[in-house]
Image (cartoon, rainbow, N blue to C red):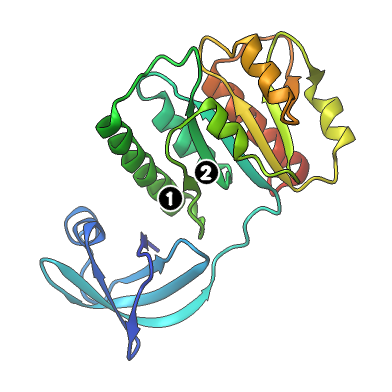
Amino acid sequence: MPRFYIPNPQIEKDLLTIKGNEVRHIRRVLRLKAGDEITVFDGSGKEYEGRIIEEGPTSVVIEVGDIFSSKEEAPLEVTLAQSLLKGEKMDYLIQKATELGVREIIPFFSSRSVPLLDKSKKLERHRRWERIAIEASKQCGRGFIPKIDHIRDYSEMLSLAPLESLRLILWEEEGGRLKEVLKEFKNKKRIFFIVGPEGGLSREEVEKSKGMGFIPVYMGQRILRAETASLCLLSILQYEWGDIG
């Protein structure tokens, strides 16, 4: 059944009116019509099943037949802090991290970040990343949409890591093996991890993170691209402590 995202849906006498971008998707892309069944989710854990009873150029009305809770999220809360990547790699990362159950993504500038964006570009990118997270949530059946934070500088990003979380930073030059660190902190259910840009993080940045409780880790001998490393670590965490497998 097709799924559509409507934040804060308002229901009156079992009727829910859909407006905005989803109307175009319903009518022009999927060509749904009166009598077709759809599901609406609000991004915070509720889903609404119903059938279309009225369609117009700017709105679609459905009669809600059932309201239920979305599938449970993974018991593991993962925040990925990702240094900005070139081109469409950031788009790809956000899409796949959403599918893998990330709770929050914090993009940040590091000393070796290549894309340098002005204020308008930052806002444009942020809006696009939010749309990507919404579409990925629709596609993979998540009832919750991960938070995509605004682009931060490196120090700001570090300060956002909760004290109770396991704080990891990927660095190929030194640190403990990931599997050993995970064994040591196997009871943690909240993880905040940092992945640098294509050129890697500087030693000064890593030392600064260590001063704020981050543990440097590496995942093996092969040098992974930044987006590959992020998705690889997220998959491992979900397998070990989350809902994969």
Q: Is residue 171 left or right of residue 11?
A: right
Q: Find disc 2 in the rendering and name its residue.
A: 99
Residue 173: give x, y in percent of width and height.
71, 8
Q: Is residue 127 left or right of residue 67?
A: left
- As drawn, the residue found furthest toward the bottom would be 13
The mark total stands at 2
Residue at disc 2, secondary structure: helix
Residue 31: give x, y in percent of width and height.
20, 60
Which image quarter: residue 214? Answer: top right
Can I make out residue 81 in this image? no
Residue type at the position of mark 2: Glu
**Alpha carbon distance from label 2 to label 1:** 8 Å
Above/below status of 122 relative to 79? above
Q: Residue at x 67, y 17 (%)?
A: 206
Residue type at the position of mark 1: Gln
Pick whichever of labels 2 and 1 is earlier in the sequence: 2
Q: Residue at x 55, y 15 (%)?
A: 225
The front one of 6 and 141 is 6
Which image quarter: residue 219? Answer: top right
Do the residues under discs 2 and 1 have CB atoms within 8 angstroms? yes
Residue at disc 1, secondary structure: helix
Residue 229: give x, y in percent of width and height.
60, 22
Image quarter where the C terminus lies is top right
Can I make out residue 144 in this image? yes
**What's the mark number on residue 130?**
none
Q: Find disc 1 in the rendering and name its residue.
A: 139
**For mark 2, does the 10 Å Cα neighbourhood hold few (<14), some (14 to 19), or many (20 or more) residues?**
some
Above/below status of 224 relative to 19? above
- As drawn, the residue found furthest toward the left would be 57
